[in-house]
Each structure stands twice: as C-alpha cells, then as structure tokens.
Image: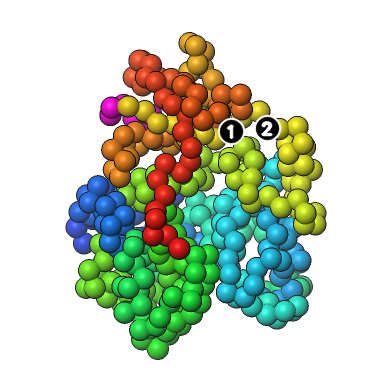
Amino acid sequence: MTENLKRTPLFDLMGGARAVGFSGWEMPVQFSGITLEHQAVRNSAGMFDISHMGAFTFKGNVLDQIQTLVPSDLSRLKPGQAQYTVLLNPEGGIIDDLIFYYQGGEGAQQSWVTIVNAATIDKDKDWMLNHLDLNQLEFEDLSPSKVLIAVQGPEAAGHVERILQKKLDRVKAFEHGDASYNGESVFVGRTGYTGEDGFELLCSKEVGRSLWTALIESGVVPCGLGARDTLRLEAAMGLYGQDMNDSISPLEAGLGWLVHLDKGDFIGRSVLESQKSQGVTKRLIGLQLKGRHIARHDYKVMNAGVEVGIVTSGTLSPTLGYPVALAYVPTELAKIGTVLEVEIRGKLYPATVVKKPFYKSAQRI
C-alpha cells in the first residue's frame, strides 16, 4: 500500500484481510470473500470497521444554527432520536449526506453528534465552521480519537446486547443511547448502511479494539468494503461521490423525503422550492438487468440509440441473483417499467426501470 494512506486504530486487527486504498485510507475490501460476508449480514451478523468516517460533536445553542444547513426539520427530533439528512450548498447541491443524533438538552444545554463520510470530513468541517457561530456553541472533531464499528444483520442485536450486557430493545431504528464497556462509555446508534437492523458503536480506541475482538469471538463475521457496497446498493442507499454530489439536489437523488419545506429558511431552499413546483429534469432510478451483464459506474444509459443517462452504481446482487444498478435519466424516462439499454463493452443490453429499493429486509425495525 502507498505509505501516505492512513490506517484506523483497528487496522492491525484485520489479519487475513485484503486491503485497498479508499478515500485516503488503507481499508479491508474483504476477509473471507465478498459474497460470504454479504450473506452473513443478510442472514446472521457481520461487522465493519468504519472508523475512517468522521464524527463531530456540538454543544450549546445548536438547533437553530444547524437547521439552516439542512433541508430536514431537526426540531422534530426528541432526545435519543436521529435524522439522516444532507448538507446543501446555495445551488441546492449535496455537500454530503450525514446523520444528526440529538442527545438531549434545551437551549444552550443541547448536545448533538453527527457522523459524516470519510472523504468529506475536512470539507464538511470547514463548511460547518464557516456557517456556525462558535460563540454560541462548542464544536469538537472526534474523528482522530475514536473508533466506529457497524454491527449489522438480523442477529446483530443479540451479539451487541450480550457483549455490552445491556438490553437495547427500547432503542428503535434511528434512535440511540449509551452503554458502557470496560468502564468506558459507548455511544450506540441503531443505524447502518446495509438495509438490515444493526448498530453503530462509537467509542475510544482502546474500547474499540476490545469490542472488535469480543465481537469476533462472539461469532460476528468481519466484513470489508466490498460487501458494504453490495449491501448498500441492494438497499438502494446512495454513495456520496457516485450517486450524489455537489451538483445534484436531494429531489433529483430520490431523497425528497428529507426536504421539509414547512420549516424555516435553509441554504439552498429557493432552488428546492423551484424544483418542487416546476419538477426536476432528471432522477435517480433503479435498473434491473438479466443474466450476468453488470452495469458499472459511468456506463452509458441509452434509449432508441441515443445516450440519455449514466450509471452511478451497479453490481450483481448476491441476494437477488441478478444485476441491479442506479442511474440518472431524464424524468420522462424514469417511470417504473420503462425499458432502456445499458452499453456494456460496446454492446447494448436491456435494463428495466424498477422500484427502489431492490431489496427490503423483513426484519429491519
């Protein structure tokens, strides 16, 4: 690996994993194999070292300020709840997708945590600090000092509860709480990026290393970036930098449910209001192909011999057994059932617009 790639505090515990460079980090792409790891998450429990992602805390008069950064109404959150949302620029483009966790407190006593993507830590931090009044709140970047572990799958809760020795049934999806391990606090969020039930555990480096070892001993399967990508794609969860970016709005990216125009002003609001009233010209769609012809990132989407769009993500779904993809096409071609074509190595293959997500777990709470 290139010497300037960073490593997480858990890297030396990844024995046997094949590593790759990802967003400036040396990360495991697979341990036992992508398909085996994928199936472990779908059928039992798998875990991911996601310590490369960023974590920020906010304390003080927080809500009124962060409300202006996102289109979602964070005032709806009660203590212990979380909101997936997006940071927007003035053009309505997505700076990053992230999760805000409201820990509680009123007025100047509020406490919040947010988890951001690894590739955008510095960008997000600069954007926030340039738009927040630091006289009214305390901002801390926990990214260099913590470990973040995602435990995902239908059996994830059982493993996490046994190791933390705490019942977590009262913590529902997109809620969070605290536990202790080896005498230290562990932030426990019932969130994830796989389409399954699961938890994301934020803690110190020392506790994280102990937790990783304990989870393996408990039978949780270590997983790499390969399975993380196939799992999130089956669940039609966008990857920042591929399926969304600074020039794509949440309405175009299929994230209209994050836009609450009944709240106050926020950056990019006028653009989204215009798109809402006039409609968008392109949309992110789901495509299903036949056989084993996989529509990869940047492949052309065609209609009647004319290029009409671009594939942003694609794979052969391990769960469904056929290729699926996400792509942007003109709104008039986004109707479910529309048959388009994808150019794969110089040949055109039929691709049908289907409903997203491609896979939905019956066990997710």
Left or right for 113, reference 137:
left
Mark drawn on residue 283? 1
Taking depth in this image into account, of 31 and 302 the one nearest to the observer is: 302
Where are the magenta residues, as a range?
Answer: 291-297
Mark drawn on residue 268? none
* Residue at x 74%, y 46% (from the top left corner): 268
In the rendered image, residue 187 lying in the magenta stretch gets the answer no
* Residue at x 34%, y 30% (from the top left corner): 294
Q: Residue 166, image x and y in percent? A: 39, 83
Kind of residue at badge 2: Val
Residues tagged 2 and 1 counted as in contact (Cβ below 8 A): yes
Left or right for 337, reference 344:
right
In the rendered image, residue 296 lying in the magenta stretch gets the answer yes
- Can residue 213 be seen here? The reply is no
Vertical comparison of 196 with 155: above or below? above
Q: Residue 142, image x and y in percent? A: 52, 70
Left or right for 101, reference 162:
right
* Residue at x 56%, y 28% (from the top left corner): 334
Rounded to the nearest angstrom, the CA distance separating label 2 from label 1 is 7 Å
Crowd class of label 1 (few under 14; some 14 to 19; many from 20; radius 10 Å): many
| Residue underneath mark 2 | 280
- Can residue 34 be seen here? The reply is yes
